[in-house]
Image: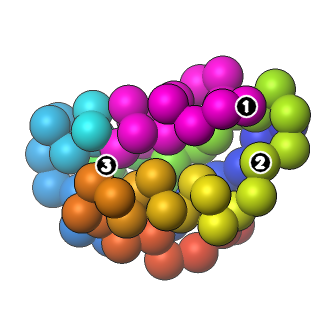
Amino acid sequence: MEKKMVIEGMKCMHCKASVEKALQAVPGVTAAEVDLEAKTAKIVLAEDVADDVLKEAVKAKGFEPVQMI
């Protein structure tokens, strides 16, 4: 299963790595890949994870999850 999230506030490779790490630490997430240019994160899940849980992981790192697409 895959989900995609639009995220504001990422500007550099450090931001990219921080968001990827935060998402990968969420139970049920097997991979996360951020596209800085598109301002999105592709999240690969082993099981269903609530959107709010994914958004909170991103918010905790200081970025703004805009929407799930």
Outermost residue toward the bottom in this view = 66
Residue at 15 percent of width and 55 percent of height: 11
* Amino acid type, label 1: Gly
User: Could you tell me residue 25's position as x and y percent?
Assistant: 50, 30
Instruction: Decide which of tag 2 and tag 1 comes sooner along the chain.
Output: 1
Q: In 3D space, how far apart are the residues under numbered discs 1 and 3 (Cα atoms)?
A: 23 Å
Q: Is residue 39 something one can see in this rendering?
A: no
User: Could you tell me residue 12's position as x and y percent?
Assistant: 13, 45
User: Could you tell me residue 29's position as x and y percent?
Assistant: 66, 31
Please state the extent of the stretch shown in magenta in the rendering.
19-34
User: Is 10 rendered above or below residue 31?
Assistant: below
> Comparing marks 1 and 3, which lies closer to the viewer?
1
Name the residue nearer the viewer: 48 or 6: 48
Which mark is on residue 28?
A: 1
Q: For residue 38, what is the image quadrant?
A: bottom left
Q: Are marks 2 and 1 in contact (CB under 8 Å)?
A: yes
* Amino acid type, label 3: Leu
Q: Is residue 61 left or right of residue 3?
A: left
Of helix, strand and loop, which one carries label 1?
loop
Magenta span includes 33: yes
Q: Which residue is mark 3?
A: 36
Q: Is residue 67 left or right of residue 39?
A: right
